[in-house]
Amino acid sequence: MDEETEEAAVLRLEQAGYQQRFPGTVKEAESVEELLADEMSKLTMLEQDIISFDVHGISLEVEETEDLVTQSLSEMEKELQKIEKKSAYEKALNMNPEYVSSRSFRLQFLRCEAFNCKHAASRVVLHFQQKEELFGSGDVLVRDVRLSDLDENTLEVFKSGVLQILPNRDVNGRPVICMFLTKWKTKTDVKGAQRLLYYTLQCTGQDEDLQHKGVVAILYFAGKKASAISLNLVKDIYRVRLCMPHVLDAMHYCYENKKMRPLVSGLRFFVGKRARMRCRVHFGNQEHILFQLQTYGITIPEDSPLRRVHGDFPLTWHEEWLQIRQAQETELAELGGAKPRIVLPHRFDVLFGRGTKVRSHTGNIRALHLVNIWQPRYDGASNRFEKAGISERIISMIHESSGRFLKWDEERGWLEVDDETARDKISHW
């Protein structure tokens, strides 16, 4: 199921009689939903299973061997050379070939396209084209976009929490990006909205673990009028998503007002086939919607912004996230290099600290389970050296599953502790 182009999606709308507009009535929405259901019914059972696995976060990853990576990078280069119109890409390549041709940068696009070299090359070219349109052709073209690259108005909207990465990953370790339409400022222009999405997606793509897992997106409508969102706006936003090296495994549309049904149906109908098949719609009151999201493995603690969509929701986490991002980007700009800061712990990381959020973290639950398994042997150890060896074994098991031992720092985010501190954590459990 190849990703449908924007032009093809708009053409499909026109053929359906909507002439580049969203369905305007419930009857039109029903027609769209029938078309979507028919499209899904024509998929094979295997294709439907793959989609279901993706949405629930249990999809199979491509086995990434060194031979596959080397061969794919070589094929990707050949595909890039075949593309004729790529002015922004060529400009970036001349400015900083090390950045554009780096293994880590190109691997993001290969992973995104499941190592389809032709598709990956096309996305790279689109990436630089879109980046130049949004941020210009200066040095930003060949480096990561920073908060300082956003204009004052766009940054103000970003700080309001309209678009944010939620503080908890889903149960399968995927980050959850949420857009709260009720918080959107009408003074924000289309370019500003595109820049916000570009920056947010860039942040999720910098973690290699997330390049394999993909991301989940939630679009929450709570009383927003349908007329505030146009097809052109959706088209421009969707173009940003297509240029970024990330896999959108699931998109959840949530709405409480039945008048939003035509808009939601139109949004699903417009996007490309891969994304369209992975859209899930949740209608009802807030309690019902949150329950539905949780059935898809999306964790919603008491302090989650999703529980406060109708009022002033808490921004503590979002402000901390912005502060850590700003500190890291400043350090990178001033010192010419900085170790990426940990903002969202991985699934099997072990967290230091107190409170429900720490105790309920998957990595902590798993580590405590390992401790309980080894507890009889630890209690029966004849000396402290034997006990230390058991602690080391548990730590090794956690490290082997890409787990880390992390302690929170208000200014720098989660910091990895040394082995001695990790042993003390295990021993005192």
Image (cartoon, helix red, strand yellow):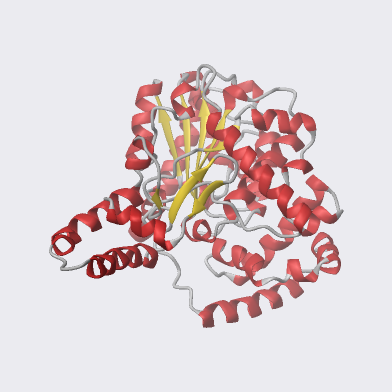
Q: Position of residue 131 (x, y in %)?
A: 76, 51
Residue located 75% across and 74% down the image: 82
Position of 189 with respect to 370 (left or right) is right
Q: For this rendering, which residue is in front, 253 or 265?
A: 253
Compared to residue 404, the image places residue 32 above or below, namely above
* Residue 403 appears in the rendering: no
The image quadrant of residue 270 is top right
Q: How far across and how far down the image is residue 175, in percent?
A: 49, 46
Q: Residue at x 39, y 27 (%)?
A: 302
User: What percent of the width, then of the height, locates residue 356?
Assistant: 34, 35
Residue at the spot 60% in from the left edge and 63% down from the top edge: 108
Count every numbered label the image shows and give the total.
0
Q: Quadrant of residue 355?
A: top left
Q: Nearer the viewer, residue 178 or 414?
A: 414
Q: Position of residue 66 (x, y in %)?
A: 52, 80
Q: Is residue 146 left or right of residue 223?
A: right
Front position in the image: 388 or 304: 388
Q: Is residue 188 left or right of residue 300?
A: right
To which quarter of the image does residue 86 belong? bottom right
State whether residue 387 appears in this view: yes
Q: Residue furthest front?
A: 383
